[in-house]
Every structure is written in structure tokens, then in C-alpha cells.
Amino acid sequence: MPQSRDRSRRREGLVVLGGRKAAQAGAVWLVGAGPGDPELLTIKALKALQAAEVVVHDGLVSDEILALAPASARRISVAKRKSRHSYSQDEINRMLVAFALEGLKVVRLKGGDPFIFGRGGEELEACRAAGVECHVVPGVTAALAASASAGAPLTHRGSAQAVTFVTGHAREGAEPDLDWASLARPNQTVVIYMGLSMAAPIAARLLAAGRAAATPALIVENASRADERRVLTTLAGLADAAASLKGPALLIVGEAMALARDGEAPALIETIVREARA
């Protein structure tokens, strides 16, 4: 192949391997890797990973999970950390399609669940538009792992009749566009993904909309991993508590978080419970 032709298509993952028609049809699997603990990987996800010929993975997928793919499988990191993106979403979409059209079994391995703030829907649409077979394997989303490890149910009779997942991520420097009045209603749990850096304005918005300052709040960093860290606070103290963490982390606000434990500050838990019942 002439060098000039190769150079324009050289970026890893965007090259149609060999440039020839695939002998057999490939396919894409959008696989949820869970929050990090390999034991939370589903059996279906494990089977898909073990059959993969190409693994296109997020930066938050643990090495222990990546090691479950065959040694011969090509591994491509498409890590996205705030403004530092190694690949745009459009490039990732084209990468998945290109590999599948070469007849390869492609696993798009995502932290948590592909369809919960994971852009799995965009990748599914790209595959459908290209006529590529696409399968979705759900994963344990971080909110479930964080809730379980802290011993704080996301729904609980008498204190949490609903749970809402929202994203705290917005354009750089902008606040998330959310229905603050709805989120401020009592007796519900609000889980904010990717909200650590926006904890102060998020807390301010909820307080301004009427959510009680004493509402229990929990921050979980690296949910389910060996270095998991949990910080218990209240909505009024959420911003200060978040300042001590670097993420990735979840913010969880709601009366049921009074049941959470961090294993280090039982006195704080008792204070939260008293304030929530006042």
C-alpha cells in the first residue's frame, strides 16, 4: 500500500485491517464491566470478553478484568478523563464499525453499565447505521455497588420511595441542566454521576430548590475497588466533603443515606440520623 494512503488512515483502530472484504461477518458487543471489582462481572460479560478478538475499553476498566480477555486479543484504550480525550466519540464509533466489518469479534468494554451515562446508545446507533450486528450486555452500575458497600439502600420504606440517576457532567465550566425542583423533593434518593467537581453548585441548587440542609449525603470514591473511600456528610456539607476527594466518585443525596457506614466515624452517623429525624 502506498505510504500516502496508509498515512491518512494510520491512527490505531481506525484502519480497516488489510483493506479486504471480511470472510465472515463480525459483530460488536457493548459490555458492562461493572464498577471495578472483577467478581461483579456478569457471566455473560465474561463469556463475551473471553471470545473477543478486539477489546476497546474505557480507562476505568481494571487490569484484572482486561486480563480475562484472550492474550491474542488486541486491546485499545479510549480513556476519557474530563477534557483529555484520546479519541472522540465519533472516532470510537467508526473504530467499532471498522473492526466488525473486517469480520472480527469486537468487545466495547465499559465501566458500569453501557446504557447508564456510558454513551452506549450512540455506539449502538452507529453499528445499526452501518449494518453491523450489535449485542448489549448489561453491567452493575456504580450506584448499586456504592449503595451495597455502604449498607445504604437506594430505596427504603419511609425514607426513599424513588431513586433518580442524573449526571453532574456538563460543558466545561457550566452547571448541569437538571430539574432541581423535582430533585429537591424529600423522601427520594438522588445519585449524581460525574459530579465531584460540581459538588458545590449542585448542593447550592438543591438547597435553593428547597431540599433540607440536614439531608444525609454520601460520597463514594472508587466504588467496589480495593481503594474505595466513603465520606458521610449532609447536603450542607457536601461541597466541603467533596473537596477532599479526586474521584472517580458518586454523590448520593437522600434520607436513606442515614443508614450508610464508613467504618470510621460512627459518631458522625449518629449525628446524621438525629438531624434527618429532627
Image (cartoon, rainbow, N blue to C red):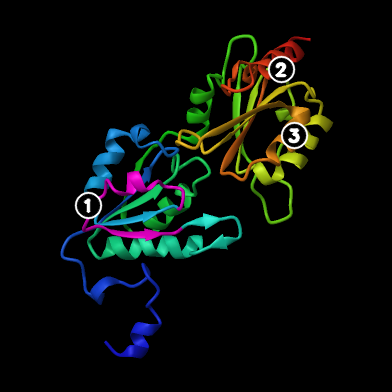
Q: Residue at x 84, y 32 (%)?
A: 208
Circles 3 and 2: CB atoms closer than 8 Å: no
Which of pointers 1 and 2 indicates the residue nearer the eye?
Answer: 2
Q: Secondary structure at mark 2?
A: helix
Q: Nearer the viewer, residue 179 or 250?
A: 250
User: Residue flagged by tag 3: what amino acid is it?
Assistant: Trp
Residue 92 higher or lower than 166, as above or below: below
Please give left or right for residue 67 compared with residue 142 in the image.
left
- Quickly name the residue at label 2: 272
Residue sitting nearer the eye, 40 or 25: 40
Mark 1 or mark 3, earlier in chain: 1
Distance from Cα at disc 1 to Cα at disc 2: 48 Å
* Magenta-highlighted residues: 59-78
Residue most extreme to the right: 208
The residue drawn where x is 41% and y is 51% is 124
Residue 277's place in the image compared with 67, above or below, is: above
Q: Residue at x 65, y 21 (%)?
A: 188
Please, what secondary structure does the residue beneath circle 1 have? Answer: loop
Q: Residues within 10 Å of mark 3 (few under 14, many from 20)?
A: some
Look at label 2 and name its amino acid: Ile
Q: Quadrant of the N terminus?
A: bottom left
Q: Label 1 belongs to which residue?
A: 70
Residue position marked by numbered label 3 in the rendering: 180
Q: Is residue 66 magenta?
A: yes
